[in-house]
Amino acid sequence: MPPQAGQAGRAPSPAAVAVGVTALVVVVAVALICAWPWIDGLLAAPGTEAGGLRAQVNTWVPAVAGALVSVGVAYLAALGIGGLRPLGPGSEWLLLAFAPWLFAGPGVLSIANWQNVRNLGLIDTFAALVPPLLVSVPALLVLTLLCKGLAERAGGDFFSGVFLPSLPMAGILAGAVALVNAQDLLWPRLVAQQPELWTAPAAQVAHLGAFTAASPDVGAATPLVVVAVALAAAVAAQLLYLDRLALTANGSRARTPAA
């Protein structure tokens, strides 16, 4: 029996509205309570080196540079494996060479990378703060699968069918990797001992170890400008790009039923 006219657009009951408003208030209150140390740190003036301009430059410039390198290399590899498909249907097997490093962070190779930086004479230099990972393997996996799906639909048009549609995803992943790089503590502590080269997380740890104040600048590692830019980028990506993507299994696609 067909639904009555106007039933789909029926207004919610007052009880449902009350439950929804109550849930929203509870979630906002819990979020504010949990995030208050960070909010308080943002509202207060920087009282330590962690919130200063030098520490922010040491934090974000190497983080962005490392993200551009690691995701850029991964993107080129994904275009080759998933877009050009040199081995045909079996091209994805090339990803097995990177499988051991899918969940490996900088700590696994930190000693070897530190030795390389030391041999180059870059210890206690600004260049040493750049994360040493040359390929972001998670980004390689995501971009390869995306390029594969685009290549199957492109019909041989590599530039406008694979390269251009996958470029926004590479930018999204580069931003995510930059945020992760900026919060790394191990590598900056290994290669930079001078206070003028400390990143924000390293300066926070040094401040805690010195026992010079009750608490460090909690919001120094995630300044308000960076959070605002990240949220704006996430909203724009969702509205303009991510909602157009679809995951399929075994190449399956939605089919219209036969008449």
Image: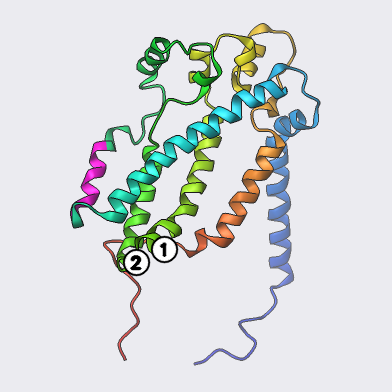
- Specify the principal SS of the magenta part: helix
For label 2, the residue is 154
Q: Does the magenta stretch include residue 220?
A: no
Residue 123: x percent and y percent? 49, 11
- Which residues lie in the magenta part? 90-97
Snapshot quadrant of residue 104: top left
Please give the label number shown on residue 160. Answer: 1
Tell me if residue 94 is in the magenta stretch.
yes
CA–CA distance in space, label 2 to label 1: 8 Å
Q: Which residue sits at x=34%, y=36%?
A: 102
| Front residue of 174 and 244 | 174
Identified by mark 2, the residue type is Ala
Task: Work out whether 186 lies above or below 140.
Answer: above
Residue 166 against residue 244 in the figure, above or below: above
Position of residue 245 relative to residue 205, above or below, is: below
Residue under the point 35% across and 82% down: 256
* Number of residues whose C-alpha sits closer than 10 Å to that of mark 2, classed few (under 14), some (14–19) or many (20 or more): some
Q: Tell me where residue 259 appears, x and y as whole percent.
A: 32, 91
